């Protein structure tokens, strides 16, 4: 259960409803997920977070599937079960296959393992890797 509970559309203030409406219009959906309903207790945080997500996840140099898979990879590394579920669903909607998911998780696991080894061994960065 969310710490402060969830703010449903019918119980939302006009400011929160405006953000909910924008989320539904932008995502072409008829529902608001629990993440948004949980942070709606602070309308400023809700609006700021939505505007940032909307901007970052909008079409750009990276295609929608790549963006969702990057988000999924970071969510797996951060062990956020909610975000893993949410961005797995979004990545699947954008075309991610089971094989791509499995390969992505293998890369995430390997990166976490080698990152920890580098940190533990305190490996110095090679000069050839430094940007001029």
Image (cartoon, helix red, strand yellow):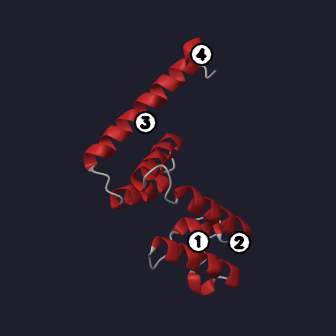
Give the x, y percent position of residue 89: 38, 59
Give the farthest residue toward the bottom. Answer: 10
- Going from N to C along the chain, the mark reached first, 4 or 1, is 1
CA separation in Å, label 4 and label 1? 43 Å
In-front residue for pair 95/13: 95
CA separation in Å, label 2 and label 3? 34 Å
Give the x, y percent position of residue 84: 45, 52
- Residue at 69 percent across and 71 percent down: it is 41
Which residue lies under the disc numbered 1?
A: 37
What kind of element bears circle 3? helix
Q: Are marks 3 and 1 in contact (CB under 8 Å)?
A: no
Which residue lies under the disc numbered 3?
A: 108
CA separation in Å, label 2 and label 1? 10 Å
- Residue at 49 percent across and 56 percent down: it is 82
- Going from N to C along the chain, the mark reached first, 2 or 1, is 1
CA separation in Å, label 3 and label 1? 29 Å
Q: Which mark is residue 43?
A: 2
Which residue lies under the disc numbered 4?
A: 125
How many numbered discs sit on the rendered protein?
4
Give the x, y percent position of residue 81: 47, 52
Give the x, y percent position of residue 2: 59, 65
Q: Quadrant of the N terminus?
A: bottom right
What kind of element bears circle 4? loop
In the image, residue 117 above or below residue 57 = above
Give the farthest residue toward the front. Answer: 132
- Going from N to C along the chain, the mark reached first, 4 or 3, is 3
Can residue 110 be seen? yes
- Residue at 31 percent across and 42 percent down: it is 102
Q: Nearer the viewer, mark 4 or mark 1?
A: 4
């Amino acid at each position: 259960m969310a710490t402060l509970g969830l703010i449903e559309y019918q119980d939302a203030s006009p400011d929160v409803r405006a953000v909910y409406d924008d989320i539904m219009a932008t995502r072409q959906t008829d529902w608001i997920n629990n993440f948004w309903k949980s942070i709606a207790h602070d309308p400023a945080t809700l609006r700021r977070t939505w505007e940032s997500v909307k901007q970052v996840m909008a079409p750009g140099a990276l295609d929608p599937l790549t963006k969702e898979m990057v988000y999924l990879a970071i969510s797996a590394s951060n062990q956020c079960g909610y975000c893993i579920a949410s961005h797995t669903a979004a990545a699947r909607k954008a075309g991610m296959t089971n094989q791509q998911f499995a390969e992505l998780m293998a890369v995430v696991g390997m990166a976490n393992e080698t990152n920890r080894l580098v940190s533990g061994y305190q490996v110095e960065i090679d000069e050839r890797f430094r940007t001029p």
